[in-house]
Image (tube, rainbow, N blue to C red):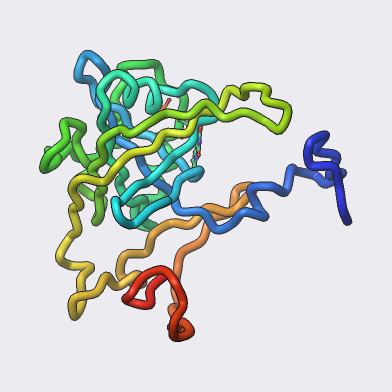
Amino acid sequence: MNYDAIENEHGLRHDPFKAIVSPRPISWISTLDAEGRANLAPYSFFNAVSDNPHIVMFSSIGWKHSVANVEATSEFVCNLATHALRDQMNESSAPFEAGVSEFEKTGLTLVASSVVKPPRVGEAPIALECRHLQTIRLEDVEGKFADRWMVLGQVVSIYIDNAVIHDGLIDITELCPLARFGYRDYSVVYEVFQMVRPAGGGGEKSGAA
Ligand SMILES: Cc1cc2nc3c(=O)[nH]c(=O)nc-3n(C[C@H](O)[C@H](O)[C@H](O)COP(=O)(O)O)c2cc1C
């Protein structure tokens, strides 16, 4: 099949776009609002976009609390949503009123971050502490603004639970990060294989892309 993606005439039961761009990592974003109240929400329009400096982005469908809080306070933390934390991650995506702490609603532990003010999720094995770089309002090919907001931040401090480090490397099968597909589908990494990149290829010296 082939369809007009602008009109989005896919003719399928559900829009397949998110199932196609899969799997996506889930960032569980913790922020503080202007009054210092904690907020937590999962975002799968999330990724790393640069390794030096370390830059990550998340994108919000509408002007949600996480974006508003980053705009107000210039900091956020990307906590890793793992398989063990899947229920709390899901619960925290409910549309709570501004000022309601998803930490309280889910029973998760607020732990002070190292250098930024928003707390990290104590139960999450990895947290990226970020400072806001820019928020870009997305626009389409006709230059029409969408109610979609991409937030870019630089990672200024990283927390890793020592338990997931084996022989100096992060063991992804120990970590069990959640991966998001389309529809109601998720996955976890159970199997890992290696490939060595061709000599002379650009990118990272370590061979890890
Ligand atoms: C796995 C998962 C991934 C999500 N990814 C996104 C996303 O990328 N962008 C978005 O706007 N909402 C996403 N949501 C929905 C938000 O988490 C939800 O709207 C939440 O209430 C936003 O909270 P906030 O207003 O406190 O930021 C996702 C929900 C789940 C369960």
Q: Nearer the viewer, residue 151 or 64?
A: 151
Q: Quadrant of the C terminus?
A: bottom left
Which residue is at the far top? 35
Decide: is 99 above or below 102: above
> Residue sitting at 34 percent across and 70 percent down?
172
Left/right of residue 208 with respect to residue 170 in the rendered view: right
Left/right of residue 113 with respect to residue 100 in the rendered view: left
Q: Quadrant of the N terminus?
A: bottom right
Q: Nearer the viewer, residue 81 or 195?
A: 195
Which residue is at the far front? 200
Quarter holding residue 114: top left
> Residue sitting at 30 percent across and 28 percent down?
39
> Residue sitting at 38 percent across and 77 percent down?
207
Decide: is 179 above or below 208: above
Q: Nearer the viewer, residue 126 or 176?
A: 126
Tell me where residue 163 appears, x and y as whole percent. Answer: 17, 67
Left/right of residue 98 with respect to residue 62 in the rendered view: left
Tell me where residue 89 appears, x and y as whole percent. Answer: 39, 43
> Residue sitting at 44 percent across and 50 percent down?
47
Total residue callouts = 0
Tell me where residue 42 appears, x and y as whole percent. Answer: 42, 40
Q: Would you say residue 193 is visible in this rendering?
A: no
